Image (cartoon, rainbow, N blue to C red):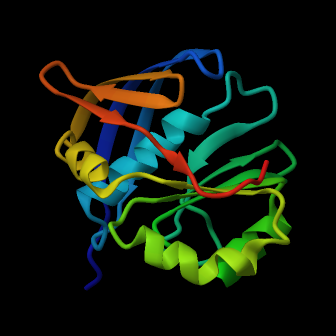
Amino acid sequence: MALKATIYKAQLAIADMDRGVYADHNVIIARHPSEADERMMIRLLAFALNVPADDKNGKLDFAKDLWDVDEAALWHKDYTEQILHWIDVGQPDDKRLMKAAGKADRVTAYSFSSSTPVWWKGIETKLTRASNLVVWQIEAAQSQALAKLAERSMQLQVTVQDGTVWMSTTTDSVEITPRRLTAGV
């Protein structure tokens, strides 16, 4: 019998001063049985950093990347199902990223492992044609601290200013400074 996803709920209060996005979002995250808290929280971070200010061009949704290799971790589709923004987390291979770059207007990847420099060095030159791709590194210590905020029901304040993100609960706070690895859009 296959294991089922565990459902997590998060109330996000987002104040993104860099993009001028201020909104509250109630999100439901289906956590795959093989997914660790760290990866799930990076998906939640990616949502907070990329959610559009409004839904007039569609909305950002969690997809089923661990269930279906043809889906992103998150994606922003317009109302015609055109993929405006494909978002991956982890260390996807160059073929997956290039395929995504051909399907979507924008592609963003968030890598959060201590092996990110090795992974990036191995694929960086293979992605030069993908001008719509941006890759970010989240330091492993920061993503591990973020994982400690994971609960089945979460209330998180997300503040973004000058490229730094603070994710806070009522009792704890984590500072995250994503580092851009690419020169894309």
Image coordinates for residue 28, horizontal then vertical, percent: 40, 42
Question: In this view of the protein, can residue 60 be seen by the observer?
Answer: yes
Total numbered circles: 0
User: Residue drawn 68% across and 72% down?
Assistant: 97
Q: Quadrant of the N terminus?
A: bottom left
Is 69 left or right of 28, judged from the image as shown?
Answer: right
Answer above or below: position of 8 versus 126. Answer: above
Residue located farthest toward the left when viewing the structure as drawn: 171
Image coordinates for residue 158, horizontal then vertical, percent: 40, 24
Answer above or below: position of 134 versus 169. Answer: below
Answer above or below: position of 55 versus 32. Answer: above
Q: Quadrant of residue 104?
A: bottom right
Image coordinates for residue 21, horizontal then vertical, percent: 61, 18
User: Residue drawn 29% across and 45% down?
Assistant: 8
Question: In this view of the protein, can residue 68 be seen by the observer?
Answer: no
Is 163 left or right of 105, judged from the image as shown?
Answer: left
User: Residue drawn 29% across and 46% down?
Assistant: 142
User: Residue drawn 53% across and 23% down?
Assistant: 162
Q: Quadrant of residue 6?
A: bottom left
Image coordinates for residue 79, horizontal then vertical, percent: 82, 42
Choose between 60 and 179: the one closer to the eye. 179
Choose between 53 and 68: the one closer to the eye. 53
Q: Quadrant of residue 56?
A: top right
Is 53 left or right of 150, judged from the image as shown?
Answer: right
Choose between 95 and 138: the one closer to the eye. 138
